[in-house]
Image: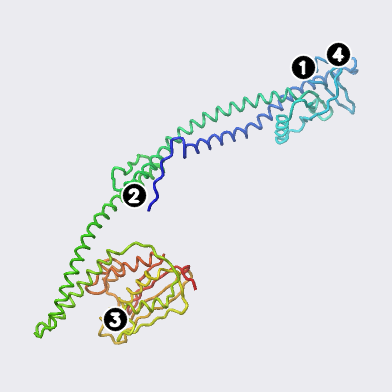
Amino acid sequence: MAAEPRAMPGPFSGLSVKLITIIVAVILTAGIVIYLPLVANYRDSWLADRLRIGIVAARVLDAVPDVMALPQTLTDRLLNSAGAKAIVYRRGGQSQLLSVEGVEMPKEVVTADMRLDDPVTRILGALDTLFAGNGRTLRIVGDSDGSADGVVEVLMSETPLRLGMLAYSRNIALLSLIIAAITAIALYVFVSRTFIAPIRRITANMVAYRQAPENANLIIAPEPRKDEVGIAERELAAMQTDLFTMLRQRRHLADLGLAVAKINHDLRNTLTSAQLLSDQVATLDDPKVQRLAPRLVTTLDKAIGFAQSVLDYGRQSATPPKPGPVDMRLLVEESGIEAGLMGHPDVRFSNGIPDGLVINADADQLGRVLVNLLKNARQALEANTGASHPPEITVTFSEAPDELIFTVADNGPGLPPRAKENLFIAFEGSARAGGTGLGLAIARELVEAHGGKLLFVDQPQGARFDIILPATARLS
């Protein structure tokens, strides 16, 4: 029994939620990737501003030979403008120091060397400042005049830099969230109207149509789009139309088949009664009756056989094969017995299947195929009364890289051209007068259900049919 159709997801579930999640995640990821260089640049700018003040102080020190002669008010003004505790100027192996009066030497010092300009160092320095706690002392190092002759060092608290970077990060995060929200909403509205809404429409239509495939009102009306969604809608509409037509035809054929089956059932009973009467008539001594009775009996036998074949074809089920180990030589022997070949007075039967050949197949269905082919060959040889050679039917086995081939061949008259053209077509592919052509049609369906093929191989004399099964079916 088919599974119950799933309920349609809500407007904020399924693809919608996935789409919003992906959009927001991508935008936030892009924001993080962009944020790292931005915060590194912010830190570098902040440090460069403080270093410039240190360079100004270095130039003052260059102008004043004796640093001790500088007034403390000028020293404090220089240090306060940079927010520094001390400024060190190194040149020519000598160092000069400007410091706040009474300043103590810091215990934890972190160095920011402005002479290192690679992106990785800048980003790692920014992350170190952000995630470090307050209370550290920052040592900013840089060239005083763009050359390595003079070096300026600025010692100051790292807390103002960290607070500034935190405020800058909050602003960036808020801006990123606003951009992400606006972009996500815009993209969601666009993609929803362009893709998700049509997909939901197609999905809802498929769910509804599955519940009532014979309702033509549920066939989707394609929109005039030229993209993939439009093609999918048009193909779905065409498929639903074809399915609706086939279901209606199947219902009509089923009704017609039921009527034919009833007619055939009644006809078979009537013909059986007529056959019994013909058997009684055949016992009469009238010469005319004796001459006409065999013809009457033969005609009634053909009519009964035709009615029985139609009933069997109507009862033919689509049951899948039930594979199991099958001894092919034994199966061919049993099929030959059922086809009336064992002990036949005129037709020689040769079973060329090697001993121990076991395959994985449905023994009943494969046996029906063999019985049909063997019985057809026997009837063809029995009708070929003018043959100059002994009639013979052979069953052989051969093997290809990917195939197992079982061949049923006879040395009879072969198939007429009309039978070759309509072979395997029900009611049209019979090779003998009065036949229905249902046997080969059923045999082909049974072989195809095993994943194989039933082929007619044209040859100069006789008829040959190959049953081809996948090589994976062989067990030993």
Q: Earlier in the sequence, mark 3 or mark 1?
A: 1
Q: Secondary structure at mark 1?
A: helix
Q: Residue at x 33, y 85 (%)?
A: 343
Mark toward the viewer: 2 or 4: 2
Q: Do residues under tags 2 and 1 come within 8 Å of each other at their CB atoms?
A: no
Relative image position of residue 179 (x, y in whole percent): 55, 28
Label 2 sits on residue: 239
Q: What is the CA distance from the residue labelled 2 to the residue labelled 4?
A: 94 Å
Residue 23 placement (x, y as % from top left): 53, 35
Instruction: Check disc 1 and give the amino acid type.
Output: Ser
Cβ–Cβ under 8 Å for marks 3 and 4: no
Gap between marks 3 and 2, in whole Å? 48 Å
Percent of width and height locating residue 444: 35, 67
Q: Is residue 86 above or below residue 407?
A: above
Q: Amino acid at mark 3?
A: Leu
Residue drawn at x 76%, y 22% as measured from the top left: 50
Horizontal and vertical percent position of residue 213:
31, 48
Does label 3 or label 2 sit earlier along the sequence? Answer: 2
Res 81 label: 1
Q: Is residue 387 left or right of residue 64?
A: left
Circle nearer the N terminus (2, 1): 1
Mark 4 residue crowding within 10 angstroms, few (<14) / some (14–19) / many (20+): some
Q: Earlier in the sequence, mark 2 or mark 4?
A: 4
* N-terminal label among 1 and 4: 4
Quadrant assignment, res 197: top left
Name the residue at 28% across, 51% down. 245
The residue wearing badge 4 is: 72
Q: Say which of marks 3 and 1 sits in front.
A: 3
Tag 2–tag 4 contact (CB < 8 Å): no
Tell me if label 1 and label 4 are in contact, CB under 8 Å.
no
- For the residues labelled 3 and 4, the Cα–Cα distance comes to 131 Å
